[in-house]
Image (cartoon, rainbow, N blue to C red):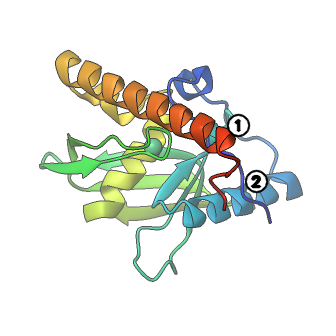
Amino acid sequence: MAKLPIVIYPNPVLAEKCAPVTVFDEKLETLAKDMAETMYAAPGVGLAAPQVGQPIRLVVIDVTEEKNDLITLVNPVITEKSEEIAECEEGCLSLPGVWDRVKRPAVVTVRAQDLKGDFFERHCEGLLAVCVQHELDHLDGVVFIDHLSRLKKERDKKKLHKLKLEAQKKAKEDARNGTSPRD
Ligand code: NI
């Protein structure tokens, strides 16, 4: 298994409509395992394939504190959603340092294939419902700040840009001082 580099917004792969998975082979299994390892290490509760530069319809999720309920969704589709709406603060590994409240259906049912190509359904509530919808959005080139008002989205984009510049500045200073951030 290997940890993969996470793609940061506004990388164009995050705006792509991802292609369906048609081949269920070892390569797909390895990618899903590497994505899970990357998600757990981050740490995060979900990761979509475009976030590691692969524009295909594959998602891994684990919202449990114990990290013992890994859900791998291939070609997922939401088949049912509640009229009830819930608002939850969301963040994203591709938008580090930015969080905002997003409104989504409170309960959804997702139908997907597993890594062997077999179909299954999962009823999702609470944080799992939020996460499934957030990750499925990634497969259609949508990030969570796309759900916000234009004003809030611009504010978040500015914050993201500022954090990026600060991180670059710090990396340069560390390089000048002969210390790497890994030390
Ligand atoms: Ni995300």
Q: Which mark is residue 54?
A: 1
Residue in front for this viewpoint, 51 or 97: 97
Q: Secondary structure at mark 1?
A: loop
- For the question of whether residue 11 can be seen, the reply is yes
Label 2 crowd bin: few (<14), some (14–19), many (20+), radius 10 Å: some
Q: Could you say where residue 80 lies in the image, as x and y percent from the top left? A: 32, 48
Please tell me which residue is depicted at 62% across the width and 30% down the height of the picture: 18
Residue at the spot 23% in from the left edge and 50% down from the top edge: 89
**Image position of 2 (left or right of 106):** right
Q: Is residue 158 above or below residue 53?
A: above
Vertical comparison of 92 with 126: above or below: above
Q: Residue at x 65, y 45 (%)?
A: 177
Tag 2 near tag 1, CB within 8 Å: yes
Which quadrant would residue 127 be assigned to in this image? Answer: bottom left
Q: Is residue 136 left or right of residue 56?
A: left
| N-terminal label among 2 and 1 | 2
Quadrant housing residue 60: bottom right
